[in-house]
Image (cartoon, rainbow, N blue to C red):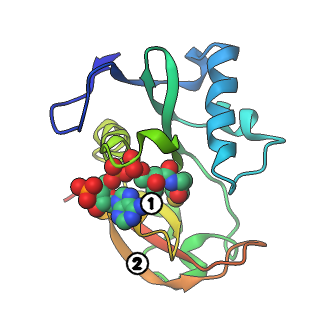
Amino acid sequence: MTAIDSELREPVGLRIHVVRPVGLSCTKLDELACLIVEGGQIRPDNIADRLLRCRWIAYATDNEKVVGVAALKTPHDGPDDNAFYKAKSPYNYDAFTMEIGFLMIASPYRRKHLALALTKTLCDLESRSNLYATVVEANCGAQSVLLRNGFVQSGVPFADRGGSEPLVLWVKVPT
Ligand SMILES: CC(C)(COP(=O)(O)OP(=O)(O)OC[C@H]1O[C@@H](n2cnc3c(N)ncnc32)[C@H](O)[C@@H]1OP(=O)(O)O)[C@@H](O)C(=O)NCCC(=O)NCCS
């Protein structure tokens, strides 16, 4: 556990944690799952199992209460059912084994650079790996967080599985 770095706004009382999912207590796993589901984009039924399959989970607490989360997922999508294929990206999906996802900040804690810090924490852990993320095209906040962490947009907006809004693919390749 580390104190949030000095770039964050109003850091007093806030802590960032980064863990392997296996190191989480059931209570903390439930708290993280509840916060992610609040975002409205993730179905509640299997979120805990999906979190347990992540490589890393970064989360922020305010006096022990979870107020923000992001994770590094290891997706296994099919050759014609992955974001790179659907976005017509020049990059090859097989070269990207980790995806930043489950990014959610509790409403009262937004615009304090928590999303920036959680995303940076995960990027720093895997700084030698290709990373990607997909974001709803209209979600300027999340896209700004990726841009400011060194991601660039790749390909064209594409239709989500069952979702109504187009998604945009973002990639980060080590230099
Ligand atoms: C999107 C979200 C994760 C941003 O979290 P956050 O902690 O408030 O973001 P940060 O404070 O780190 O913002 C970093 C920068 O992103 C941009 N940004 C963040 N939220 C924004 C918003 N609502 N509108 C426009 N720009 C925004 C700003 O440029 C901001 O920097 P600034 O405050 O210095 O101008 C948060 O609003 C959220 O949890 N939303 C609901 C869930 C969601 O959309 N998750 C992303 C799914 S991919």
The front one of 12 and 163 is 12
Return the x and y of residue 113 as percentages of the image width and height: 30, 45
Q: Amino acid at mark 1?
A: Tyr
* Residue drawn at the location 75% of the way across and 34% of the way down: 49
* Residue drawn at the location 29% of the way across and 18% of the way down: 2
The residue to which callout 1 is attached is 132
Classify 99 as above or below 59: below
Q: Secondary structure at mark 1?
A: strand
Disc 2/disc 1 C-alpha distance (Å):
10 Å
Q: Amino acid at mark 2?
A: Ser
Figure quadrant of the C terminus = bottom left
Classify 76 as above or below 104: below
Q: Secondary structure at mark 2?
A: strand
Pointer 1 residue Cβ closer than 8 Å to ligand 1:
no
State ligand 1's quadrant: bottom left
State which tag comes first along the sequence, 2 or 1: 1
Q: Residues within 10 Å of mark 2 (few under 14, many from 20)?
A: some
The residue to which callout 2 is attached is 154
* Residue drawn at the location 35% of the way across and 16% of the way down: 1
Side of 172 relative to 164 (left or right): left
Q: Residues within 10 Å of mark 1 (few under 14, many from 20)?
A: many
Return the x and y of residue 75 as percentages of the image width and height: 62, 52
Classify 122 as above or below 39: above
Return the x and y of residue 55 as percentages of the image width and height: 53, 35
Return the x and y of residue 84 as percentages of the image width and height: 53, 74
Mark 2–mark 1 CB contact (< 8 Å):
yes
- Give the number of the disc on residue 45: none
Could one spot residue 54 in this view of the protein? yes
The front one of 59 and 49 is 59
